[in-house]
Amino acid sequence: MSTLNELITFEYRIAYDSAYSLTQKPLFSNPKIYSGKGDLSKRWYVYFYYRNEETGRLKLATPIYGVANKYKTKEERMSVLLMYRETLLKLLKQGYNPFVDNRELHQKLTSKGTGLTPAPIQKKEETSMPLQEAFDFGLQLKEKIVSERTIRDYKNKIDNFLKWFYKKHPTLTCIHQIDKKNVTEFLNTVLTKTSARNRNNYRTELSSILQVLEDNDIIAANFIKKIPVLKSIPQKHKTYTQKEQVAIFEFLETKDPILLLYIKFISYGFMRPIEVCRLKVKDINLTDKTIQFKAKNGLLKTKMIPKILWNDLLELGELKKESVLFTPNELGAKWDTAIDNRRDYFSKRFKKVVKDNFNLGTDYGLYSFRHTYITKLYRALREKSSPFETKSKLMLITGHTTMSALEKYLRDIDAELPEDYSEML
């Protein structure tokens, strides 16, 4: 009785006796487009490799230029070369060999009305990928290499851009019809409505997606890289005075204890608001007195819990480990919403409960507590240590990964002030 393996291999030999063997190496590579990195002064062409019968190795065939380099715009050149590449691939699959006489194949194809002569340029709408499809393709590849939050930022900015683009240019529907002028016009709109910083963020993220499209030969070049970055004034959060900080804490002890504990994690643990929002009960190690969380740079960090914060956490051991630590109504509960939504919720809650009651301006926020307590700690350490020793100790507490990053941060928040210099004057 034949075994299953014998039956399968027998059927395979019958079905594929005259076909291409699966064990045989491919005869040719997929044709690719060389676009000179978007430089129109260079010659653009389609190139591919074909296996040499004598050596058995893939050999570069003569590149196909056609009439592509007669055109003076990137979109027109790419449109022609995309058609060349598609036609070449069809011919290769039908038996075209660049190293032999293909007269019979040529006659066969031309008799059917499909010759080797390149077709004239078609309209861009027929040869270019639709806008939404192109951006979706870029996002799909980005999802493999960036965080979920970053993908949400990409999607939001792309949606806003496409909404604007379709409204301003309803007749343009394909990716090759977007150019530097279009994007610059959109970025100027963002600048006038918001800020230079937000405009630069749009530029960066749109450019990142277009770079994916360039790398995959969907567009000729990422022209957004040529759009300059504008100088922007970073948002600066003021530090609280000792009187303001004490008053806020005393007010929250009775008004909103959950918000107070949330702020203490920022103040005493030197965590960022979004890092606090990521915390689950299981991230608090009551035995070792440590906190483990995902930091701004994506790395998993572990910090010690100082005594000043420890006393507020003694009851956490009774909560479910997988529950979210900070939720709207209680500690350690279920809260099915995105991290960004949690952060925004507590920011709005802080404004309503604290800022509105204390008449604090826009330059005061949750981040201000982190700045306030790092300043306090730095000045206390500085009284007994040299600047370098102080910063070395501070790095272990704040979580900054480099001395230069910490020094820049301390300069930004004016942590160190000079001694009185009146006598020098």
Image: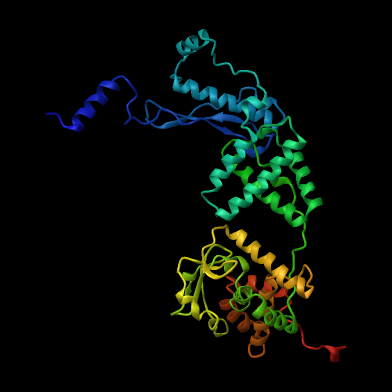
Residue 135 x/y as whole percent: 61, 40
Which of the 4 quarters of the picture holds residue 93?
Answer: top left
Residue 290 lies, with reference to residue 115, above or below; the image says below
Residue 26 x/y as whole percent: 39, 30
Which residue ends up furthest to the top in the rendered image? 111
**86 and 51: which is toward the camera:** 86
**27 and 101: which is toward the camera:** 27
Residue 379 x/y as whole percent: 68, 85
Tell me what residue is drawn at x 69 percent, y 40 percent. 162
Tell me what residue is drawn at x 68 percent, y 67 percent. 349
Tell me what residue is drawn at x 48 percent, y 31 percent. 30
Horizontal side of residue 353 vs 343, given as left or right: right
Residue 227 lies, with reference to residue 382, above or below; the image says above
**296 and 46: which is toward the camera:** 296
Which residue ends up furthest to the left in the rendered image? 1
Residue 90 lies, with reference to residue 337, above or below; the image says above
- Mark yes or no: residue 98 visible: no
Quadrant occupied by the C terminus: bottom right
Horizontal side of residue 32 vs 363, given as left or right: left
Residue 312 x/y as whole percent: 55, 81
- The mark tally for this picture is 0
Which of the 4 quarters of the picture holds residue 158?
Answer: top right
Q: How is the image coloured?
A: rainbow
- Mark yes or no: residue 317 visible: yes
Quadrant occupied by the N terminus: top left
Residue 117 lies, with reference to residue 367, above or below; the image says above
Horizontal side of residue 294 vs 184, given as left or right: left
